[in-house]
Image: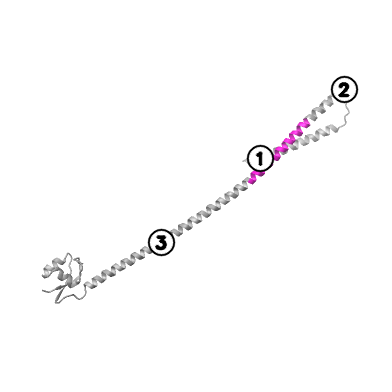
Amino acid sequence: MMKGTTRMKSRYAIVSATAICGFLVLVSGCETAPQKKDAGQKPLYENMVKVQEAEISQLKARLNMLQDSFTEQTKSITTLNQNMQILEQRNQGLQNEISSLRQAICEEKQERQAALDSIVNKVGKEIGKAMTVTAAAQAKESAEAGKVPIGPGPFVKYEVQAGATLNAIAQAYKVTVEDIKKANKLKSDSLKTGQLLYIPKK
């Protein structure tokens, strides 16, 4: 909008200057025309010449003002163009910085995600190892429990039924709980359905 207004003013100044120059040429032509005037008309003619000279002087002053204004406007336009170029360069610089920041954020996000995935995988492996060790320990305990019984025989094989306890089994076979635990290398009183026990005969 500012550029359009400045250009219109500049065009108006140029047109005005051109019109004034044409008028000056016309007036000058009138001054050089043959001055065959009557003696009675000479004062009137001189008065007209003075008036025209005063008008020409005013027009010249106006023309100088318009030329000065045109020069100032030209300088203003040049300054505005330079400022616009500076602003465009700054804007481009800011856009480059924003692009760089976005790229850095994206890279950091990817690095954090990769680190998180690595931690999750590591924790998963540790849990898997722990579960494997636990399963192996349970299998070892079950295998040890199913080995050849300890102590003098003979022994009776008994498969644990649902709801059975060491106390009930001991009473049924008329032995002690400690006898059953010792013969089967049991560390606790807990039993599993289907577990094989060796019961000492009395």
Q: What element carries label 2?
A: helix
Q: Residue 6 carries which label?
A: 1
Asked if residue 104 is positioned above or below residue 188 in the image, the reply reads above
- Real-space Cα separation, disc 1 to disc 2, in angstroms: 52 Å
Residue type at numbered disc 1: Thr
Q: Measuring 64% from the left and 41% from the top, which residue is drawn there?
A: 4
Q: Are marks 1 and 3 in contact (CB under 8 Å)?
A: no
Percent position (x, y) of residue 77?
A: 66, 43
Q: Residue 40 carries which label?
A: 2
What segment is highlighted magenta in the picture? 55-82
Residue type at numbered disc 3: Asp
Q: Is residue 56 left or right of residue 34?
A: left
- Real-space Cα separation, disc 2 to disc 3, in angstroms: 115 Å
Percent position (x, y) of residue 58?
A: 76, 31
Disc 3 target residue: 117
Frontmost of labels 1 and 2 is: 1
Q: Is mark 3 on a helix, strand or loop?
A: helix
> Quick one: quadrant of the N terminus?
top right
Magenta residue check for 2: no
Asked if residue 168 is positioned above or below residue 101 in the image, the reply reads below
- Real-space Cα separation, disc 1 to disc 3, in angstroms: 63 Å
Frontmost of labels 1 and 3 is: 3
N-terminal label among 1 and 2 = 1
Residue type at numbered disc 2: Gly
Q: Measuring 38% from the left and 61% from the top, which residue is drawn there?
A: 120
Q: Measuring 29% from the left and 70% from the top, which residue is drawn there?
A: 136
N-terminal label among 1 and 3 = 1
Magenta residue check for 75: yes
